Amino acid sequence: MGEAEIIQLEGRRSQPSPQQKTRCRATTAAGNPCRNYAITPSGFCRVHSSDEASRARHPSGRDTRPERTPDPEDREHLGLEEFIKRRLSGEYPIDDFGYDEQLAREVLMPLVRPLYENYFRVRTFGVDRIPSAGPALLVANHSGTVPLDSVLMQYAVGTEHKNKRLVRSVGADLVWSSPVIGPMARKTGNVVACDEDTDELLRRGELVGVFPEGYKGVGKGWSERYKLQRFGRGGFIEVALRSRVPIIPVAIVGAEEAYPMIGNAKLLAKLLGFPYFPVTPTFPLLGLLGLIPLPSRWVIEFGTPIPMDEYPEDAADDPMTVFDLSDRIRDTIQQMLYTNLSKRGSAFF
Amino acid sequence: MADAKHSVLITGVSRFLGLRLAKRLENDDRIGSLVGVDLEEPPVPIEGLEFVRADIRNPMIARVLEATKIDTLVHTNIGSSPALLGGRSQMKENNVIGTMQLLAAAQRAERIKRVVMKSSSAVYGTRPSEPSVIPESYASREVDLGGYGKDCAEAEQYVRDFGRRRPDVALVILRTQNVVGPTVRTNMTDYLSLKTVPTAIGFDPRLQLLHEEDAVEALYRSIMGEATGIYNIAGDGVVFLSQAIRLMGRVPLPLLLPAAQITAGLLRRFGLIDFPTDQLKLILFGRVLDTRRARESLGFTPRFTTFDAIKDLRMHRSEDVTPEPSAHPTWERELFEYLKQRASSDREKV
C-alpha cells in the first residue's frame, strides 16, 4: 500500500525519478549547456524540445533562440506557482553574462507589452532584415533622457522578429554601478560597454546593440531632437571590423517626445555624479509623477545590414577606414530618422 | 621529460588546497618524491610526504629547495583571510614577502624546471564595469586594488620577474575563483552558510565558484602537463547571489548598503565570517572569468559547475579540516635538524 502511494504522488507531481534526471542536450542562446532536465525521449527539455527543428535549419545550432511555440500548454507549464517555486529554490538557469531568460520572458516582457503596444504604439519596419541566426551589431540612435529606447528595441526584436532573437545592448559604467538598475540590466541580457564583452558575444553568435552617441545622445536638449550627436570614437566600428559581423543601422523615433528635455540642471548633476540632470515639462516639477513618459508614437526601423567582411583583415587598425565607416553609418541612420519622422506624422496622436 | 618522475615541493601543504593536492599526489606513479612545506604539520597523514617545517619568508628555504632536489615548485601558500593569517599586515608578509623569498631561493635551485603558483581572480579587481566575462589578457583598471587582490598581483609580478631571470623554467599561474566544497573553509563558504545571509538592497551580482576538487585537478594538471602561462580557473556557469542563497536553502536578508557594511564589520568582529572590505565589493558587483584558455591549453575542464558546486556545498556542509595556523616556536630548530639529517644521509649515499 505504502509503495503504491509513493508512486501515485510522483506521478501527480510529474517529478522525474533519479534515473530519468538527465540534463537537456541543447545549448542556450549564450552557448552554455541547458540546465533544465530533459523531458523528451531525444533528450531535450521543454524549452528546447521545439528547438530541434530550428536546429536543423541552422547547423550552428547555438545561434538560434528557441522559437516560441504557440502551444498553449507551453505557457501553462511554467505557471505562476511553478515560477515562484523555482525562484525560491534557486532552480533556474542564467547565462554567463547574467541573462535570466525565465525572468525576462515570463515576467518582464509581459510588463513592457502594454507600454510597447498601447502606450507608445510602436511600429517596426524591417525587423526581419536582422539575420535569423548568427552575430550582428545593431547601431541605433540614443535619445530621450531615460534609455527607454534600448528597452523597446529589445522588446521589438524579441517579439516581432521571426526567431524572437535577444538583442544585448551595451550599457555605460553608470548603469553597472547603480543599484537596482545594474542588476536589472544584467538580468535582461545587457552587457558592459567594453571590447571583451562585445567580442565574446559576437563570437558566440549573438546580437549586440550599441548606442554610439552615449550620454551625449540621451542628454541632449529638446532643440537638438533627432540630430545625431558625434558617434563616440568609432569603437563600435572596430568591434564589427574585428569580428567581421554586419552592422545593422537602427533608427528609433519617439523617444525624444517621451521625455522632452528642456533643461539641464548641471550643478545638480555634478552634485549627484550624473552625466546630466534632465528638466522636462513635468520633471522635477511634478515630482515622481514627472517620471511618467509622455505618450509619444514610436517608430523603429531596422536598416539593411552593412557587411564588414569586404574590408581587409586589419581594417580595424586603420583609423581613416574606421572614421569613414562611422560617418557613413551615422548618415544612414540620420536619413532613416528623417524618413520615419515624416512617415510617423503627429508625435502624439 | 614527460615520462620522468616529478619531484614536487608544495608550499602551504597544511592549508586546505596544499593538503588536498598532496593527498592527490600521494600514491601517484609519476611522482618521484613529494615534499611539503608549512609552519604546521598537515592535520592528516600523507603517505610518502616528506614534511619540512619551514617559513617561506626565511632565506633558509633556499637550503630546503637545494637539499630536497625537487624539480617542480608548487606555491599554494597565498591566503585571503586576514583573521587566519594573523592580521592584514601578517597576511601581506606571508603572501608577498613569502613569494618574493621563495622565488629568490628558487632562482638558485638549478634543478627546478617548473613553478606553479596559485593566484586568484582577485587580481582583476571588482569594478562594477569590468568585463562581464574576464579573459586572462584583461588588465585591471582598478586603481585602488587593495588587500588580497594586490597581494596576488604583486606575487604574480615576482613570478614573472623570476621567469625573466630563469627562462629555462616553465611557469604556470592559476587565477582561481572563490573555492567552495565540502572540506574547504573560506569566507565564501562561511558567508553562504549563514542562517540568514545579509545582502545589499539593489545589488545581485553573479557568482562563479570553483569546487575544491576542480581546484586540485587544475593544480595537478599544471604540475604534470607541459602547458605554461596564466590560466583562469573556475567552474562553468554562473548563478546570482540571490539564487545561490536559495540553492543553499538559506534566506537572504537585504540591507541598505551602509547597514550591510556595518553588518560585515560586526560579523568580522565576532569571528563569524571574515570578509575583508576589499572582498566585500564582490557581493555587490561580482566577478566572472573566461575559462576558455584553461580548457584549450591546460586541458582542464571542471567537473563541477558553479550550480553543482553550491549544491555539493549544501550537502556536505559539516566538518572543517582547515587547521588554525599559528606561529610555531620550534620550527626553526626542527628545520636545522632536518637539514643536518638530510646532509648526513647524502654523505652516506656518496
Image (spheres, coloured by chain):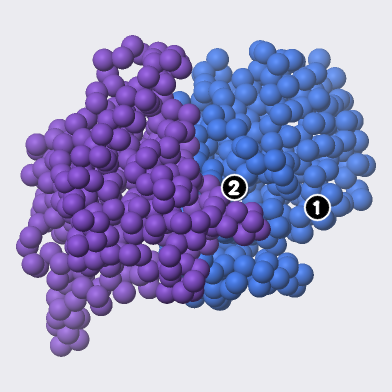
Chain colours: A purple, B blue
Which mark, residue B127? Answer: 2
Categorize mark 2 by other alpha carbons within 10 Å: few (<14), some (14-19), many (20+): many
Looking at the image, residue A287 sits to the left or right of residue A265; the answer is left
Residue at 14 percent of width and 71 percent of height: A76
Same chain, labels 1 and 2: yes
Foreground residue among A228 and A198: A228
The answer for which chain carries disc 1 is B
Mark 2 or mark 1, which is nearer the start of the sequence? 1
Q: Residue sitting at 43 percent across and 37 percent down?
A: A229
- Front one among B137 and B158: B137
* Residue at the (23%, 46%) spot, across then down: A341
The amino acid type of the residue labelled 2 equals Arg
Q: Can residue B150 be seen at all in this image of the molecule?
A: yes
Q: What element carries label 1?
A: helix
Which quadrant holds residue B140? top right
Please name which of the two marks, 1 or 2, marks the residue nearer to the observer: 2
Q: Which residue is tagged 1?
A: B88
Residue A254 drawn at (x, y percent)? 28, 53
Viewed as shown, does residue A207 lie left or right of A212? Answer: left
